[in-house]
Image (spheres, rainbow, N blue to C red):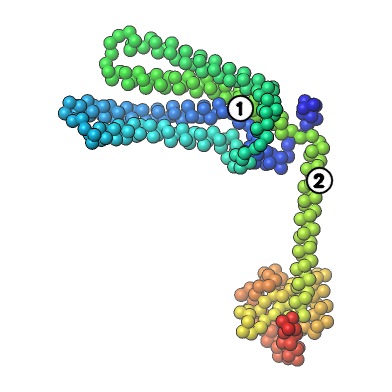
Amino acid sequence: MADTDQDQKTEQPTEKKLSEASERGQFARSPELGILLLLCATLGAFGFTAKTASRDIAEYATSIFTRFASTPLRSDTVTVQLSEAMLTGGRALAPILCACVVAALLSGGLQSGFRMSPEAIGFKLDRLDPIAGFGRIFNKSAFVKGGIDILKLCAIGTALYLGVRGLMFDPLFSAPVEAAYLGQFLSHATIIFLSRLIFALGVVTAISYGYEKFKTSRDMMMTRQEVKDEQKNAEGSTQAKSAMRRMARRLMQKQMLDAVATADVIVTNPTHFAVALKYERGKDAAPVILAKGENRFAQRIKALAAEHGVPTVENKPVARLLFAMGKVGETIPAELYQAVAGILAVVYRTHRYYFHRLKSRRLEPAA
């Protein structure tokens, strides 16, 4: 049944499904890649710090053996010697440990695309299901991973065998050598073993990660019906958002139209734009935009203004700038203070009776 379902998955995964899979931690992962990067980091750090670390250890050993006969064996001297030994060893190992930490983080980041997957960390009860666990153990993927593990074992064994066979002909095992040569031999042997292990694991990692990539891509495939359902859901979500935006726009328009009756003046284009302004001395720092609109909505603002007797002033440049730069509920831009002040001065002088009624009109909602 599972194979039949898989055969029906012929479509590439959508961005939404890829994003959801990434959040669940469903992406190609190969533990061999982490081991490979750790070995590379160890080899790189060892190659850069081996000479300095060996010199520090040699100087410490020389100091210890030089003072060995003259150093009394007491608790305080033992503590000092142990501290020096730990400090010397720590300085030698610190670069390698730091490189391994960076390699571990880099391994996880490369495989996950440096994205957080919080759902992958959480505890899941279905992992305790023995039937599901049995299915995970005995399936085609488990056999492939078992084969990769056997290949990894063979590769590592072969690399170690070749490394040991090559080192067995070293003069260390057949002739007397100086003590300093032992350090050179250990450094050389470490580099050889790590290099061979890296090469062998590199081949295994390429096979393992390639399989995981193929398996993940195959599991992420979708049927045509799943793609259609996701597109339908996305369109429904888009329609819902559009409906919410239309509702918010209608609500804002209603609030603006309700505020037109309390405006001091309507500045018009005269046909394309209309902007309602209000200014109360002692309350407003500058004239405030109560409403603005263009074309058909501008005509509605002007009709309401005429119904309530709100003065209307035609000023094309000011109306255009107020509509383009101003925001409803906020004061007008500072660049238009002087122009609007001139309009209000004319209106206050020619429509005194309107402003006498406007004071009581503004008090009505508060009452």
Q: Position of residue 264 (x, y in %)?
A: 72, 82
Kind of residue indicated by mark 1 = Tyr
- In which quarter of the view is residue 344 placed? bottom right
- Kindly identify the residue that appears in the image at 18 percent across and 30 percent down: 71
Foreground pick, 310 / 1:
1
Placement of the N terminus among the 4 image quadrants: top right
Residue 209 numbered tag: 1
Placement of the C terminus among the 4 image quadrants: bottom right
Foreground pick, 239 / 1:
1
Question: As drawn, is 242 to the left or to the right of 113?
Answer: right
117 is higher (above) or lower (below) than 255:
above
Foreground pick, 337 / 45:
45
Kind of residue indicated by mark 2 = Lys
- In which quarter of the view is residue 333 placed? bottom right
Question: As drawn, is 239 to the left or to the right of 25?
Answer: right
Q: Is residue 126 visible?
A: yes
- Kindly identify the residue that appears in the image at 64 percent across and 85 percent down: 281
Residue 55 numbered tag: none
- Kindly identify the residue that appears in the image at 53 percent across and 22 percent down: 201
Q: Which residue is mark 2?
A: 232
Q: Position of residue 244 (x, y in %)?
A: 77, 59
**Disc 1 crowd, CA 10 A, few/some/many (<14, 14-19, 20+):** some
Q: Position of residue 24 (x, y in %)?
A: 65, 39
Q: Is residue 321 visible?
A: no
Query: Which element type, helix, strand or loop, lies under badge 1?
Result: helix
159 is higher (above) or lower (below) than 135:
above
- In which quarter of the view is residue 114 placed? top right
Sequence-wise first label, 1 or 2: 1
